[in-house]
Image (cartoon, rainbow, N blue to C red):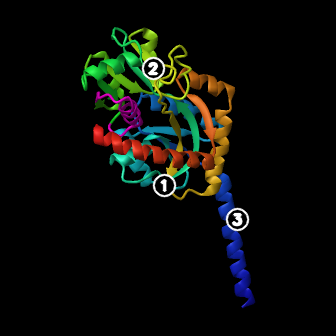
């Protein structure tokens, strides 16, 4: 009996040491970071910038894998099939809420582990440079007398840009026609005169704004967009509205706490770097770290707002 107890103790000790060693080894292979939109989209550009920097701070290669479709739902569904071992993560955003309430995603945000918030992007309304709309008020005034004539492109039904755009125009009591696209097609559709305006994250528009072919007429976020410092927010234009786009790291439900914490430590180091902050602003994003607890608390609050907005949005659009 004593021999059995001793042998059992050795087994438990071995398992404990092994588990500790495995925890200390993470990460010991490349990490897959799923991006919900195509290569070249705003989400993709910011994700690759973040992944390159985080790779150095986490000590392993982070491989960006694009899985676009259904406003982000395709990528979220893919992540739910992966092991919660920290090697399959998703570049999540507000779309985890809007895709669920639109019906495109059958798993709520509670079906994922939310590791940390990384950045904020401020959605903007943009038109071609030769558009008669010089500001948001011009567009709203026209829409009031020409209901549904203005076609507004977004990154897909149920995407955050769809939610933000539909909520904005609904709040003003005007009707426009919301046109969902694959994210990479939105700007080309605007340039081809297939739509009159777009609601997009700044990163997707920067090259076109810099070339003078597209003009940003308003920021729908809580502050001015650093990439377009001369463009006033909706609030500054006398229109009460704001919707900030956050992006962060989420993973399959059930990730070990020590792995989540290790990723958070690396994220905080990356996002506090002055060099990263400078790079981020060039691509239209703001470094805005939140740890897992604060991140989830914010998502809980926003979930209530999105649920109400999406219910009304889907009814009207």
Q: Secondary structure at mark 3?
A: helix
Q: Earlier in the sequence, mark 1 or mark 2?
A: 1
Q: Which mark is residue 17?
A: 3
Q: Position of residue 167 (x, y in %)?
A: 39, 34
Mark 1 vs mark 2: in front: 2
Camera-side mark, 3 or 2: 2
Which residue is depicted at the point 50% across and 39% down?
63
Question: Residue 12 or 277: which is nearer the viewer?
Answer: 277
Q: Along the horizontal axis of the image, is 241 left or right of 190?
A: right
Residue on which the image places disc 2:
218
Report if the CB atoms under discs 1 and 2 are less than 8 Å apart: no
The quadrant the C terminus occupies is: top left
Q: In whole angstroms, how far apart are the C-alphas of marks 3 and 1?
A: 32 Å
Residue that mark 1 sits on: 110
> How far across and down, in percent of the image, does residue 72 sit?
39, 41
- Picture quadrant of residue 175: top left
Indicate whether 102 appears above or below 106.
Answer: above
For image coordinates 46% across by 55% down, the residue present is 111
Q: Which residues are magenta?
A: 157-177
């Amino acid at each position: 009996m004593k021999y059995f107890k001793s042998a059992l103790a050795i087994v438990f000790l071995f398992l404990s040491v092994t588990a500790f060693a495995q925890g200390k080894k993470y990460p010991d292979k490349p990490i897959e970071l799923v991006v919900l939109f195509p290569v070249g989209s705003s989400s993709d550009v910011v994700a690759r910038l973040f992944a390159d920097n985080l790779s150095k701070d986490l000590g392993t290669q982070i491989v960006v894998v694009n899985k676009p479709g259904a406003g982000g739902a395709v990528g979220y569904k893919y992540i739910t099939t992966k092991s919660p071992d920290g090697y399959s993560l998703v570049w999540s955003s507000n779309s985890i809420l809007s895709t669920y309430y639109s019906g495109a995603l059958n798993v709520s945000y509670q079906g994922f582990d939310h590791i940390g918030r990384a950045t904020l992007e401020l959605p903007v309304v943009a038109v071609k440079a030769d558009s008669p709309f010089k500001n948001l008020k011009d567009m709203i005034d026209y829409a009031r007398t020409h209901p549904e004539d203005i076609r507004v492109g977004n990154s897909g039904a149920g995407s955050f840009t769809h939610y933000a755009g539909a909520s904005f125009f609904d709040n003003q009591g005007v009707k426009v026609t919301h046109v969902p696209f694959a994210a990479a097609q939105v700007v080309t559709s605007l340039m081809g005169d297939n739509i009159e305006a777009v609601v997009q994250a700044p990163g997707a528009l920067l090259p076109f704004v810099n070339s003078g072919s597209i003009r940003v007429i308003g920021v729908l976020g809580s502050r001015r967009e650093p990439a377009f410092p001369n463009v006033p927010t909706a609030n500054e234009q006398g229109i009460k509205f704001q919707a900030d786009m956050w992006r962060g790291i989420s993973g399959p439900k059930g990730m070990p706490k020590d792995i989540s914490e290790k990723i958070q430590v690396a994220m905080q180091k990356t996002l506090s770097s002055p060099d990263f902050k400078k790079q981020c602003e060039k691509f239209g994003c703001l470094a805005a770290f939140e740890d897992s607890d604060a991140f989830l608390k914010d998502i809980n609050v926003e979930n209530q707002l999105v649920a109400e907005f999406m219910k009304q949005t889907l009814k009207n659009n």
